[in-house]
């Protein structure tokens, strides 16, 4: 099994439960239901890119298995990336999907394209409720040692395929956009 750079055991809460702890500026980012890729591209003049960290078959973390209603021993497709603006990582993302539900989905061929750029062009895409987590749990270990102020996740459904998309907003984004610390 490949190294998992995301810590285990995070405590996710419904978005509404986290709103009182979050500034309006962060709420616009974390609670948005549209494409994060499109938002990131619009937020900076620097070129958007994806740095692929890991992709392949593995087992879900306990919280991922619960969210997807899977047996923890199930096999999943896992993809971990950094969403970059220029050379700076702004978002770390981990997406997982039950291997059995990927009939025809071309996720393996994304390469350095963002999952969101593909998903949000698909007809019939449905996004489930957004859950939010506050740092320091989980601490995302990135290539640059940065921690995240906020993370969010939701299940995106496309036909019979369910993909749990988890996005962790990094401190560089906070600084570059002059967002409050929380």
Image (tube, rainbow, N blue to C red):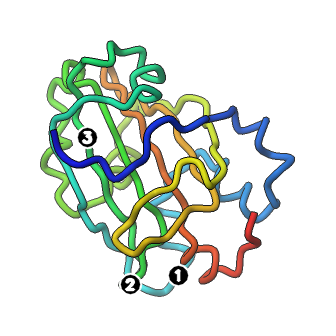
Quarter location, residue 156: top left
Quick check: marks 2 and 1 in contact, CB under 8 Å?
yes
> In this rendering, which labeled residue sits more in front, label 3 or label 1?
3
- How many numbered marks, from 0 up? 3
> CA gap, disc 2 to disc 1?
9 Å
Q: Is residue 1 left or right of residue 78?
A: left
> In this rendering, which labeled residue sits more in front, label 2 or label 3?
3
Picture layout, residue 152 above or below residue 174: above
Secondary-structure class at tag 2 = loop
Q: Residue at x 67, y 48 (%)?
A: 31
> CA gap, disc 3 to disc 1?
28 Å
Secondary-structure class at tag 1 = loop
Q: Percent position (x, y) of residue 115? A: 32, 50
| Foreground residue among 123 and 176 | 176
Picture layout, residue 103 above or below residue 173: above
Quick check: marks 2 and 3 in contact, CB under 8 Å?
no
Secondary-structure class at tag 3 = strand
> CA gap, disc 2 to disc 3?
25 Å
Q: Which residue is mark 3?
A: 78
Mark 2 vs mark 3: which is more N-terminal? 3
Q: Residue at x 32, y 36 (%)?
A: 96
Q: Would you call the spot at circle 1 few (<14 residues within 10 Å), some (14-19), or many (20 or more)?
A: few
Q: Percent position (x, y) of residue 17? A: 79, 36
Q: Percent position (x, y) of residue 154? A: 52, 36
Q: Residue at x 48, y 51 (%)?
A: 167
Picture layout, residue 140 above or below residue 48: above
Q: Which residue is mark 1?
A: 44
Mark 3 vs mark 1: which is more N-terminal? 1
Q: Would you call the spot at circle 3 few (<14 residues within 10 Å), some (14-19), or many (20 or more)?
A: many
Q: Which residue is mark 2?
A: 86
Q: Residue at x 22, y 35 (%)?
A: 77
């Amino acid at each position: 099994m490949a190294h998992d750079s995301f810590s285990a055991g995070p405590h996710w809460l419904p978005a509404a439960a986290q709103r009182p702890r979050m500034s309006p500026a962060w709420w616009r980012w974390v609670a948005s239901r549209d494409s994060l890729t499109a938002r990131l591209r619009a937020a900076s003049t620097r070129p958007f890119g994806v740095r692929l960290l890991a992709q392949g078959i593995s087992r879900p973390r306990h919280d991922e298995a619960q969210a997807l209603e899977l047996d923890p021993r199930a096999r999943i497709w896992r993809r971990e990336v950094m969403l970059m603006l220029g050379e700076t990582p702004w978002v770390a993302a981990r997406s997982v999907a039950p291997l059995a539900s990927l009939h025809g989905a071309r996720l393996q061929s994304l390469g350095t394209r963002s999952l969101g750029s593909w998903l949000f062009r698909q007809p019939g895409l449905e996004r489930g409720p957004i859950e939010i987590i506050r740092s320091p749990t989980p601490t995302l270990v990135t290539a640059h040692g940065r921690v995240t102020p906020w993370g969010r996740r939701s299940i995106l459904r496309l036909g019979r395929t369910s993909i749990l998309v988890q996005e962790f907003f990094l401190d560089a984004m906070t600084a570059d956009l002059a967002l409050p610390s929380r």
